């Protein structure tokens, strides 16, 4: 119960002030002139002025409210190091127990976790949100339990109560880490990609060798080991093995007593791109399909095309002097012997043996494929004859044998069951619709090696792909693909088929028919398994902390199996399925939480000091907690203070007028009459 006098003026305060000023001036004048009856008349004016102020006796019935103490706990990734998380939880539980024992006090706990955008520990943002959710008059203090590694210190809110900082971890913690300082997002295949990295020591490290052996691996395969001085930037160069995503891993050995092991590995992803695609097109004779091949290849600015074509066969005798037909001698020796390795793809379009290319040259093409090269054969009717290139040194790489029969009839190319599962032909019907234009000719082949992806007339193989040694070969048993390009009978997906064939021949990972890869978004990964089999075994996932998880893979389309997995932690995951392996990094390449995992109270020192709070290490024990009055010192050696706020809630209010109208009227009339009598008596 609280009693007080309150004023509720009948007129605005400005008007009341003016009237009081006039009253005071009148009284002063009456006193100076010694007017009769000035005293009672002045008292009557004062009563009227007091009545205008509206004095009242107020009685409030109040209910006291409890004080609120905010307890903010840091549960970020860096808190998982050592015994920090157990320190934090034990301290938070004990503080809650102590504060709950203080009368009229309650504790509100809030946990802060990592930011999904790799922004680190946003402790100040969490503190601001917690303060905004509570009435400011009841907040008696705030306790932050963290390792001090806060990444939003510039967002510290305005706080009117003490903020105390309890530091987890140990003062003598030390760590050694590796960091990638500079690396490109893209790398050109065949060229050196520069990468700069650095090995650093943090905290009071023991006397170790000031050089670290950095192991470098690409896509899970060891590349080399580099000796790197500690504390210095080291630049190295490497070549990307294939186009598309390449995972580069830098790792250093762990030492006993080291705080964090996760930052001993630095992961990055570089996309491999081809600067130029060098293609050698060998045409056996001029025809409409040859012009189409040339136009398609020349239309791509990233393709460097060398076209070797036979315009006048040696057996043709028309009396025209040779010197009038040839401007320069074609460098066949240079192309097929000396610089054949410079080509990414060789295309034989309706080529047959004419004696222009010696067997040694063709044998060198076969060796080129076995050593990793790529050959595409577009076979015409000559492929079935006696002069077929199959009957040359190339027969060791060609994936099918011609039977000497040429089928001349209308047919529509059809994707086989295997082709429906192969990335080269899977989904082609979605590119140009289901109804493709007809072709007119097919060379019958047998003794198929590799995979037949398309069939033609009489259900005979049309497109055959095969792996030879380290290289690859594709056989198209017809030269009618140009009909699709010209739009004959509705056309077909020639450009997309050629693009996929070229990329498969050049070993692009996205078109591998037997492959395991993964795509990540934050901490979620999508694992994709391409296979020609109808079933895929279980997926094995090895997490960064060493756990092994088995998952089933579901077929989403023919030849493509997928599995979705939410990673429990940031780091490198190793995947395995049916003998295939892959690695992927979840989360950022360089997590902010592990850039400097050493406990550090200095980041928030100024903020805590401005609020009057204190900083204490949990390894020294939990500080004592005291209740203090507002404005008093809130921290000392071994203790922290919580202000008493004395907040309350008003339940009921009763008011009684001190000058009711009837009393004011009687007093004014009486005093006025008294003043009139005084004047009359004088």
Image: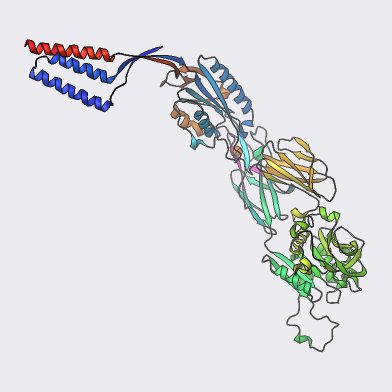
Q: Which residue lies furthest to the left in this view?
A: 682
Q: Position of residue 437 (x, y in %)?
A: 80, 65
In screen coordinates, is 455 left or right of 112?
right
Magenta span = 197-214
Q: Which colour scheme is used?
A: rainbow
In screen coordinates, is 68 left or right of 84?
left
Q: In which quarter of the image is the N terminus?
A: top left
Q: Where is residue 602 in the image (x, y as percent from the top left)?
A: 50, 33
Q: Where is residue 206 in the image (x, y as percent from the top left)?
A: 62, 34
Q: Decide: is 293 above or below 53.
A: below
In screen coordinates, is 591 left or right of 153?
right
At 70% from the left and 59% from the top, the residue drawn is 190
Q: Quadrant of residue 389?
A: bottom right
Q: In which quarter of the image is the C terminus?
A: top left
At 80% from the left and 64% from the top, the residue drawn is 375
At 51% from the left and 14% from the top, the residue drawn is 103
543 or 177, which is in the foreground?
543
333 or 644, which is in the foreground?
644
In screen coordinates, is 143 left or right of 409?
left
Q: Decide: is 313 above or below 637.
A: below
Residue 207 magenta: yes
């Amino acid at each position: 119960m609280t009693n007080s006098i309150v004023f509720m003026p009948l007129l605005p305060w400005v008007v009341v002030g003016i009237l009081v000023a006039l009253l005071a001036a009148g009284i002063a004048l009456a006193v100076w002139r010694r007017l009769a009856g000035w005293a009672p008349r002045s008292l009557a004016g004062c009563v009227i002025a007091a009545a205008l102020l509206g004095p009242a006796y107020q009685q409030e019935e109040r209910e006291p409210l409890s004080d609120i103490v905010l307890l903010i706990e840091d549960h970020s990734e860096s808190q998982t190091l050592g015994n920090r998380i157990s320190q934090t939880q034990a301290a938070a539980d004990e503080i809650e127990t102590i504060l709950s024992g203080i009368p009229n006090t309650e504790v509100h706990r809030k946990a802060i976790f990592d930011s999904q955008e790799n922004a680190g520990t946003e402790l100040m943002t969490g503190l601001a949100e917690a303060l905004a959710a509570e009435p400011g008059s009841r907040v008696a203090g705030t306790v932050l339990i963290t390792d001090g590694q806060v990444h939003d210190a510039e967002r510290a809110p305005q706080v009117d109560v003490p903020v105390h900082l309890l530091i987890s971890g140990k003062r003598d913690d030390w760590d050694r880490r590796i960091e990638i300082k500079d690396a490109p997002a893209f790398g050109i295949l065949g060229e050196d990609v520069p990468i700069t990295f650095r090995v650093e020591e943090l905290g009071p490290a023991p006397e170790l060798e000031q050089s670290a052996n950095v192991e470098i691996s690409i896509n899970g395969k060891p590349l080399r080991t580099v000796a790197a001085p500690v504390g210095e930037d080291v630049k190295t160069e490497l070549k990307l093995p294939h186009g598309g995503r390449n995972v580069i891993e830098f790792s250093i050995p762990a030492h006993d007593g080291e705080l964090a092991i996760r930052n001993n590995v630095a992961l990055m992803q570089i996309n491999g791109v081809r600067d130029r695609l060098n293609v050698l097109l060998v045409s056996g004779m001029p025809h409409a399909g040859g012009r189409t091949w040339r136009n398609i290849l020349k239309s791509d600015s990233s393709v460097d095309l060398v076209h070797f074509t036979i315009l006048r066969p040696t057996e043709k005798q028309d009396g025209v002097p040779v010197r009038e037909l040839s401007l320069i001698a074609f460098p066949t020796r240079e192309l097929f012997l000396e610089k054949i390795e410079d080509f990414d793809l060789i295309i034989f379009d309706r080529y047959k043996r004419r004696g222009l290319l010696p067997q040694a040259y063709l044998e060198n093409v076969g060796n080129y494929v076995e050593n990793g090269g790529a050959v595409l054969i577009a076979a015409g009717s000559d492929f079935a004859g006696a002069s077929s290139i199959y009957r040359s040194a190339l027969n060791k790489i060609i994936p099918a044998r011609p039977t000497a029969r040429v089928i001349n009839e209308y047919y529509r190319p059809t994707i086989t069951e295997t082709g429906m599962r192969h990335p080269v032909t899977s989904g082609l019907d979605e590119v140009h619709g289901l109804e493709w234009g007809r072709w007119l000719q097919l060379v019958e082949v047998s003794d198929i090696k590799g995979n037949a992806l398309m069939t033609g007339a009489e259900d005979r193989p049309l497109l055959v792909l095969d792996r030879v040694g380290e290289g690859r070969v594709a056989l198209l048993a017809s030269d009618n693909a140009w009909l699709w390009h010209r739009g004959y009978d509705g056309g077909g997906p020639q450009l997309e088929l050629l693009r996929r064939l070229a990329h498969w021949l050049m070993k692009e990972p996205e078109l591998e028919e037997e492959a395991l890869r993964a795509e990540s978004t934050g901490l979620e990964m999508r694992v994709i398994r391409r296979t020609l089999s109808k079933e895929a075994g279980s997926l094995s996932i090895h997490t960064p902390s060493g756990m092994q998880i088995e998952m089933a893979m579901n077929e989403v389309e023919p030849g493509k199996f997928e599995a979705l997995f939410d990673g429990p932690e940031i780091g490198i995951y190793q995947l395995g399925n049916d003998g295939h392996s892959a690695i992927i990094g979840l989360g950022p390449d360089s997590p902010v939480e592990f850039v400097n995992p050493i406990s550090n109270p200095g980041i928030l020192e100024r903020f805590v000091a401005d609020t009057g709070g204190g900083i204490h290490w949990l390894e020294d024990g939990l500080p004592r907690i005291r209740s203090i009055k507002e404005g008093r010192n809130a921290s000392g050696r071994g203790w922290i203070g919580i202000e008493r706020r004395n907040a309350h809630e008003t339940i009921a209010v009763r008011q009684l007028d001190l000058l009711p109208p009837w009393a004011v009227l009687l007093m004014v009339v009486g005093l006025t009459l008294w003043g009139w009598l005084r004047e009359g008596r004088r």
